[in-house]
Image (tube, helix red, strand yellow):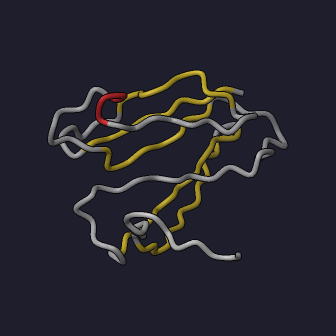
């Protein structure tokens, strides 16, 4: 099963495909840097989505997928965001979907070397 990775930015309201033919059976690492996506100097990704084609009954995750993102440097430590997800599909002529959301906080890594411990 392949999927497509699409993005939306702060400057362009429509989704555009950033990568095609990603395998759903492996964890994919996708570079969303400005240079990789050919974004303008003041442009950044605001949303992304994965588009699956037709899936067979019993389709499910097998690799324990996760998503890690880096936010703009201007985002303050502890600033809150709401992650939203929707998933949907059609079976015969019935469309069904689910929505969910959860609040997350931005986390800044410490600057410089961490103290040595355990010796």
- Along the horizontal axis of the image, is 55 left or right of 17? right
| x 64%, y 41%: residue | 90
Task: Pick the quarter of the image with the C terminus.
Answer: bottom right
Residue 11: image location, x then y, percent: 18, 41
Asked if residue 103 is positioned above or below residue 10 in the image, the reply reads below
The N terminus lies in which quarter of the figure?
top right
Number of numbered callouts drawn: 0
- Residue reaching furthest to the right: 58
Q: Nearer the viewer, residue 33 or 67?
A: 33
Residue 28, given in percent of the width and then of the height, sits at 62, 35
- The image quadrant of residue 34 is top left
Horizontally, residue 13 falls left or right of residue 68, namely left
Q: Position of residue 12 (x, y in %)?
A: 21, 37
For the point 50% across and 72% down, the residue is 102
Nearer to the camera, 45 or 58: 45
Residue at the (58%, 55%) spot, across then down: 97
Q: Residue at x 52, y 53 (%)?
A: 68
Q: Nearer the viewer, residue 53 or 113?
A: 113
Residue lying farthest top? 21
- Give the residue at the far left of this rendering: 42
Going by the image, does 118 lie left or right of 85?
right
């Amino acid at each position: 099963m392949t999927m497509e990775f699409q993005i939306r930015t702060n400057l362009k309201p429509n989704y555009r495909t950033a990568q095609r033919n990603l395998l759903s059976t492996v964890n994919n690492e996708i570079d969303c840097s400005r240079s990789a996506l050919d974004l303008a100097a003041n442009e950044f990704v605001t949303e992304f989505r994965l588009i699956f084609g037709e899936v067979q009954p019993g389709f499910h995750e097998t690799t324990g997928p996760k998503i890690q993102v880096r936010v703009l440097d201007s985002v303050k430590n502890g600033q809150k965001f709401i992650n939203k997800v929707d998933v949907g599909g059609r079976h015969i002529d019935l469309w069904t979907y689910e929505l969910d959301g959860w609040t997350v906080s931005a986390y800044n890594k410490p600057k410089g070397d961490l103290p040595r411990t355990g010796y």
